Amino acid sequence: MVSGNEAFFDRALQRLKVSVPDPLDLDSIDVLFASQPKIKGKFALALASEMQRQLADVYVPEHLAAAYTWLKQGDPQDETGETVQEV
């Protein structure tokens, strides 16, 4: 989720007064959270707030978009198109 959303991550970290890593990528965010684990929750809220302000600019990777689309569908279906029964 970092790739394509760097501006949101940057602003969220600035709101928390945390130094923004350079480069700002998945690895640097992992290192940041490993070194400052207590900021994860506050960061998540700040990031959500930043993204909510500009929802149209949020990049959602295709595999996540497909998963959300699948989850929003009604009854799950198998490859034949028949409704899958719960076990």
Image (cartoon, rainbow, N blue to C red):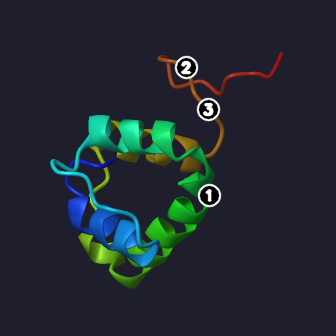
Taking 65 as reference, is 18 above or below it? below
Could you say whether the residue bearing mark 2 is in a helix, strand or loop?
loop
* Residue 43 or residue 66, whichever sits in front: 43
**Quarter holding residue 50:** bottom left
Residue linked to disc 3: 76
Say left or right for 79 vs 20.
right
Q: Could you tell which of marks 1 and 2 lies nearer the N-terminus?
A: 1
* Residue 44 or residue 52, whichever sits in front: 44
Q: Which residue is drawn at the image coordinates 26% and 59% (left, top)?
A: 5
Q: Position of residue 7 (x, y in %)?
A: 23, 67
**Quarter holding residue 86:** top right
Gap in angstroms between the C-alphas marked 3 and 2 = 7 Å
Q: Nearer the viewer, mark 3 or mark 1?
A: 1
Say left or right for 84 vs 28.
right
Q: What number of labels is visible?
A: 3
Q: Could you tell which of marks 3 and 1 lies nearer the N-terminus?
A: 1
- Asked if residue 23 shows in the view, the reply is yes
**Quarter holding residue 82:** top right
Q: Nearer the viewer, mark 1 or mark 2?
A: 1
Q: Which residue is drawn at the image coordinates 49% and 36% (left, top)?
A: 34
Gap in angstroms between the C-alphas marked 1 and 2 = 38 Å
Residue contact between numbered discs 3 and 2, judged by CB atoms under 8 Å: yes
Q: Amino acid at mark 1?
A: Gly
Residue linked to disc 1: 41
Taking 84 as reference, is 60 above or below it? below
Say left or right for 2 vs 38.
left
Gap in angstroms between the C-alphas marked 3 and 1 = 33 Å
Residue 16's mark? none
